[in-house]
Amino acid sequence: MAVSGYDLVAFAKQYIGTPYVWGGNSLSKGVDCSGLVQQVYKNFGVQVSRSTFTQIGEGKAVGMKDLQAGDMVFFDTDPNTGGPDHVGIYMGDGKMIHAPRPGKSVEITDMTSGYYQGIFMGGRRVSGIQGGGPASETENSPVAAKLSSDELAAEYGWSYSFLKSVPEVNKLFKESVSDGWTKDKFQARLRDTEWWKKNSETARAVQVQKKSDPATYAAGLNATRIQIMQMAAEMGASIPPSKLGKIAEQAMATGASLDEGLMKNILGGYVTWTAKNNLKGAAGMFENSMKKFAADQGVTLDRQTMLNQAQLVAKGLATEQDFKNQVVGQAASLYPAYTEQLMAGQTMKEIASPYMDIMSQDLELNPSAVTLADPLVRSALNGVNKQGKPVGMDLTSFQSLVRNDPRWTSTKSAQDNVMGTGIQVLRNMGLIGGGK
């Protein structure tokens, strides 16, 4: 004789309040979700396996609208893993008894609204359990209760609270209920809606969660805000407080909150100058590096170019090496005679170092004060031969050029040279003695 599902449920209700224990098999000391099902069934001589993943393969499949008391009901609580990861015992009237999770106890939950309605995977009815009444009734006697709108929505695989929130989808759902569509027909018609076509799979899942499980959605949104603020600080992006919430919603809807590359692409556009006219974070490090590299190549970077490149690098659409290659190309245009050396990895500062050394010594300048931008250095680098071909000036000619610069006359060497020349003239004139 079959076991009554109602008797089985009545027995299970005695253990409401039993603590959740991972791997637990004791109805009094602690059970997990599949342990509760196994031990309750075992009390009536019905044998099922121990884990959720194997229990869903036992007995026969039962849809939401055909559930009876005593059936196993399965849910997908972790979208990152395939298959069911939670099970309970259906009680009737859209309710189940189950062991939810660590920190909770065995309890009764309405599975047709709130969190569980959107993650229902299906039911299973094992041999030996009859859900329609006392044990003396035949197996043909149970009559399924009329499903509510929540139950019908769950049968289609959606949350009713979400279906109501989108006018186009709500109209479709009402039509499906009125005409008694199958799940497959509803899903096919749903995929033809503008809402489905305009939203990605991730965006659709987020919208469903926002309506069916607002607490979890709010927690995820807050976590995404924190993630954005931390990443923005590292990148050097300045996010206006008024836009933070909108960016977090966008990140969740597009899946960017789970993809660092997508997140950087969103935040990179907010890399900008600070009140002190510099960049910060990783963008600031890029700015300093590129300014030095450009200076060593004799290239001047304007602010907008620097900002544009910093944003591209922050977004992951370009690398620092890409920008260095552009700077080398500009240097080759300014100094065509040295293209081969530049392409081989030398900098213009290294190429010009002999001229810069002569300048710092003869003009008695601090070496750091001599730059590629100095007119004398530029003249030396862009000298031309008799054929008009750009070549570097020879060092002797360059030294002569330096000593014709007005700055040379104020050096100690120049003054000593003038003094020495004057004394020699006086000697030659016999106006002063020769000296030893």
Image: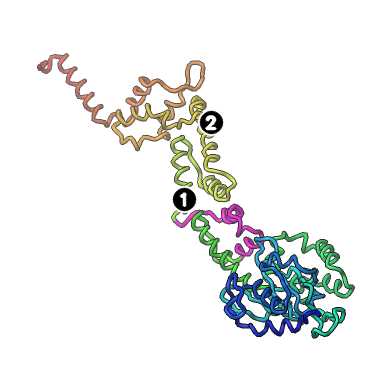
Q: Along the line of sight, which residue is nearer the eye, 379 or 213?
A: 213
For the residue labelled by badge 1, is the local secondary structure a helix, a strand or a loop?
A: helix
Residue at left 64%, top 81%? 107
Looking at the image, residue 424 lies above or below residue 361: above
CA gap between label 1 and label 2 equals: 28 Å
Q: Is residue 269 magenta?
A: yes
Does label 1 or label 2 sit earlier along the sequence? 1
Amino acid type shown at disc 1: Gly
Residue at left 17%, top 20%? 423
* Residue at the extreme right of the image, as rendered: 179
Query: In the image, residue 121 lies at what x, y percent?
Result: 74, 68
Q: In the shown orientation, is residue 360 left or right of residue 59?
A: left
Q: In the shown orientation, is residue 389 left or right of residue 249?
A: left
Task: Specify the quadrant of the image occupied by residue 146.
Answer: bottom right
Query: In the image, residue 27 lies at what x, y percent?
Result: 62, 79
Task: Specify the quadrant of the image occupied by residue 119.
Answer: bottom right
> What label sits on residue 284 in the rendered view?
1
Image quadrant in which the N terminus is located: bottom right
Residue 118 visible in image: no
Looking at the image, residue 431 lies above or below residue 263: above
For the residue labelled by badge 2, is the local secondary structure a helix, a strand or a loop?
A: helix
Q: Mark 1, residues whose alpha carbon is within 10 Å: few (<14), some, or many (≥20)? A: some
Residue 35 visible in image: yes
Q: Which residues are magenta?
A: 246-275
Q: Mark 2, residues whose alpha carbon is within 10 Å: few (<14), some, or many (≥20)? A: few
Q: Along the line of sight, which residue is nearer the eye, 328 or 277?
A: 328
Query: In the image, residue 402 lies at what x, y percent?
Result: 34, 26
Residue at left 66%, top 68%? 50
Q: Along the line of sight, which residue is nearer the eye, 356 or 191?
A: 191
Q: Which residue is mark 2?
A: 333
Amino acid type shown at disc 2: Ser
